[in-house]
Amino acid sequence: PKLRAVSSSGARVTLSDGREYIDLMNGKGCITLGHHHPAVSWAIVHHLQNRTASSTCWSDLHETLADTILADTGLPGAGVAFYSTGTEACRAALQA
């Protein structure tokens, strides 16, 4: 609990004790994307600067993302849902 992350890049995180670790915690997708991936950072900054959508209301960007995900699955009749938290997503999966 006394250790704090002081920097991160890719799969590695450096803690306040000066030691570097491979981050396997998967918090916020770091295993699949890494920390500070340039393409992800650019997309976030670009999205914020354009002010084209809201994270709480459905938008054209949500529709585009959903369509892309569905097309990538290649599964006929597949569906996609977006949730604000992992807890909400897990609850919905259990209820389904």
Image (cartoon, helix red, strand yellow):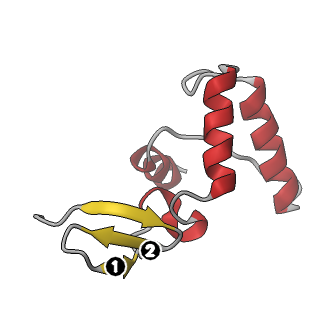
Who comes first in sequence, dot 1 or dot 2? Answer: 2
Numbered label tally: 2
Along the line of sight, the residue nearer the viewer: 89 or 18: 18
Q: Residue at x 72, y 33 (%)?
A: 62
Residue neighbourhood size for the residue with mark 1, other residues' Cα within 10 Å, grouped as few (<14), some (14–19), many (≥20)? some
Q: Under tag 1, what secondary structure?
A: strand
Instruction: Give the labeled residue for mark 2.
Output: 12
Residue 65 is drawn in which quadrant?
A: top right
- The circle drawn on residue 20 is 1
Rendered residue at 75%/31% (across/down): 61
Is residue 51 placed above or below 1 in the rendered structure?
above
Determine contact: label 1, label 2, CB under 8 Å. yes
For this view, does 5 lie left or right of residue 83?
left
Mark 2 is surrounded, within 10 Å at the Cα level, by few (under 14), some (14 to 19) or many (20 or more) other residues, namely some
Three-letter amino acid code at the position of disc 2: Arg
Q: Position of residue 46 (x, y in %)?
A: 68, 34
Residue 77 in view: no
